[in-house]
Amino acid sequence: MPVVATLLFGSLARSDSAEGSDTDLLMIDLDQETRHVSVGHLSLFLYPWSQLKADAQAGDLFVCHLAREAKPLIDPNGYLPKLQEAFAFKPSYRDDIERATDFAWFLVKFGDELNPSLLLKRALWCIRTILIARSAELRTPVFAPERLADLTRSAAARKLLGQRRRPHSEATVRSALLEFLLHEPRPNRPLQSLGRNDFVERFIASNNEVALQTLKQEVESRTGYLR
């Protein structure tokens, strides 16, 4: 596993970290291994260069974040500048918005299936993804939660973004997410009327990896508990 670069991104790279902020590191390798490990406040991502370059050319939002805000810790061969040069915006981020919107409505309706901590993380992912995607469509991508809060008319979503490190009840998170969605442009189909299986089928059809991984994670957690 030849690691050729290590990049710092997120709040520490932006210099707007606070108590409890994660240290987000991306390690670039020349193999095809992808991995994500979280230990305490350290979040470590391992990505192959070939995938990062392809995702940059495809306008991926995660790579956009890296290209715009990452700082090199170890990068003797200049992989970060190469990534920045390769990045090109998509013509539209509608697919990203729709996947996050699908999952957000699922959480509003069925979020009581998740533990409160996981529910909060996934609700924030939905809100941030939608707002980041909308800012990327304007070619002015925003990633800092405090700045993203300025992009929504939902007071509850702004509060959730500002207090994201505090515990919140399931009801508070689902209510804030619902208010946020009601302030967003309505989807083409009435997602609030879908049943649980309808959402799962929609996640599979749209390759909604975050939603599918979350459902798998919760099932495995409950199975482990029952054992």
Image (tube, helix red, strand yellow):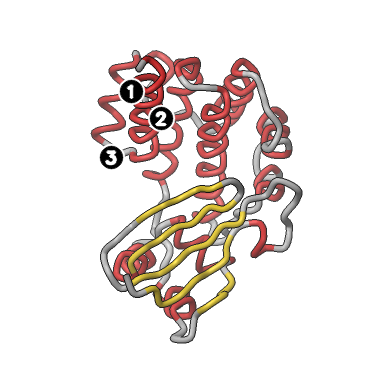
The residue carrying mark 3 is: 207
Q: Nearer the viewer, residue 206 or 160?
A: 160
Name the secondary structure under disc 3. Answer: loop
Cα–Cα gap, marks 3 and 2: 12 Å
Name the secondary structure under disc 1. Answer: helix
Identify the image quadrant of the C terminus: top left
Most extreme residue toward the bottom, as rendered? 77
Q: Which mark is residue 199?
A: 1
How far across and how far down the image is residue 55, in percent?
A: 35, 62
Cα–Cα gap, marks 2 and 1: 7 Å
Q: Amino acid at mark 3?
A: Asn
How far across and how far down the image is residue 60, in percent?
A: 40, 58
In the image, 146: left or right of 125? Answer: right
Cα–Cα gap, marks 1 and 3: 12 Å
Q: Amino acid at mark 2?
A: Asp
Identify the image quadrant of the N terminus: bottom left
Q: Amino acid at mark 1?
A: Phe
Name the secondary structure under disc 2. Answer: helix
User: Mark 3 or mark 2, which has the lower sequence index?
Assistant: 2
User: Mark 2 or mark 1, which has the lower sequence index?
Assistant: 2
User: Mark 1 or mark 3, which has the lower sequence index?
Assistant: 1
In the image, 37: left or right of 144? Answer: left
The answer to whether the residue labelled 2 contacts the one labelled 1, judged by CB atoms less than 8 Å apart, is yes
How far across and how far down the image is residue 128, in percent?
A: 56, 43
Most extreme residue toward the front, as rendered? 227
Q: Which mark is residue 1?
A: none
Residue shown at 51%/64% (left/top)?
A: 66
How crowded pointer 2 is (Cα within 10 Å; few <14, some 14-19, many 20+) is rated as: many
The residue carrying mark 2 is: 102
Residue shown at 34%/75% (left/top)?
A: 2
